[in-house]
Amino acid sequence: MCVPIAGAEPVSFDLQAHRGGRGETTEESLRAFAKSLRLGVSTLELDIVLTRDGQPLVWHDLTIEPAKCADTGPAFAGDPDYPYVGRRIAELTLAQARTLDCGRLLPEFAAAEVVSGNVIATLPEVFALAGDTDVRYNIETKVDSDPVTDSDNGRQVVDVILAAVRAAGRLDAVEIQSFDWRTLALVRAVEPAIPLVALWEGGADPIAGAVAAGADIVSPDYAVVDRAFVRRAHAAGLKVIPWTVNDAATMRRLITEAGVDGLITDYPSRLRTVMAQLGMPLPRPYSLS
């Protein structure tokens, strides 16, 4: 069970732990999410990829990457799909995916705690871990295309995510984000109260695009964000929460000079320190038992 630690006050600035805080702990592991809850973040940022049997895995990559995961053995004797590393998650069942050890040290996050033997979590497990807290969830839809039929599973991803959100009673605690803005329209059609986040990596004007997509928040690469960008976005009715901001100087600049509404970071501890130095209210930490 998670309980709030007394003395913390609600905050409006959104401190988002990217993949649970992958600069500090193995990405999207239950250990990472637990540490972020104990630390105190506003939002757990995470990704959902569907297995072949339609289960919502909390994982970023559509394909099992050897840099992150290792096979430990087949899900059953003589499994013709084994080995699983290198396969698309959409080709694997939940049972097959759960045999993988996805706890490896990544060179770009050499100081992170490695969760040895890490088993990829499911979305219901993350909800269960957080329990009855006021933490929010920024859930990214990862849409996979079948290389044979060229069809994608965007609608199924949305349906499965929303079913898990409803089952956990978290409709008022989630945002849905995507680089594939088609999925945002699918969410709005069935759950119009859920805030939508337009992720942006390049191309057309992100503010105009986010408005056209019906988004409430625009999340671009932080490099394009300055005070003028934030003013334009606010005038269009959008919040601005850039990704992925990892050094203290950039965090400070985006908060004090650009006036962003939040930041997505691999280093939630670092962002809390910056916020404290600026005299900002901090998200409440939780005690897990």
Image (cartoon, grey):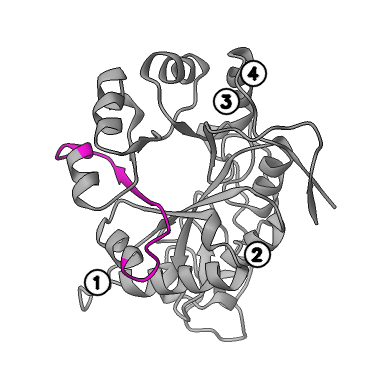
Q: Amino acid at mark 2?
A: Glu
- In the image, the segment drawn in magenta is 189-207
Q: Are marks 3 and 2 in contact (CB under 8 Å)?
A: no
Residue to which mark 4 is pinned:
276
- Marks 3 and 1, Cα distance to the nearest angstrom? 40 Å
- Circle 1 Cα neighbour tier, 10 Å, few/some/many (<14 / 14–19 / ≥20): few
- Marks 1 and 4, Cα distance to the nearest angstrom? 48 Å
Q: Amino acid at mark 4?
A: Ala
Marker disc for residue 125: 2
Q: Secondary structure at mark 2?
A: helix
Q: Amino acid at mark 3?
A: Leu
Q: Nearer the viewer, residue 25 or 238?
A: 238
Marker disc for residue 181: none
- Circle 2 Cα neighbour tier, 10 Å, few/some/many (<14 / 14–19 / ≥20): some
Residue to which mark 1 is pinned:
147
Q: In this rendering, is residue 184 above or below 210?
A: below
Residue to which mark 3 is pinned:
271
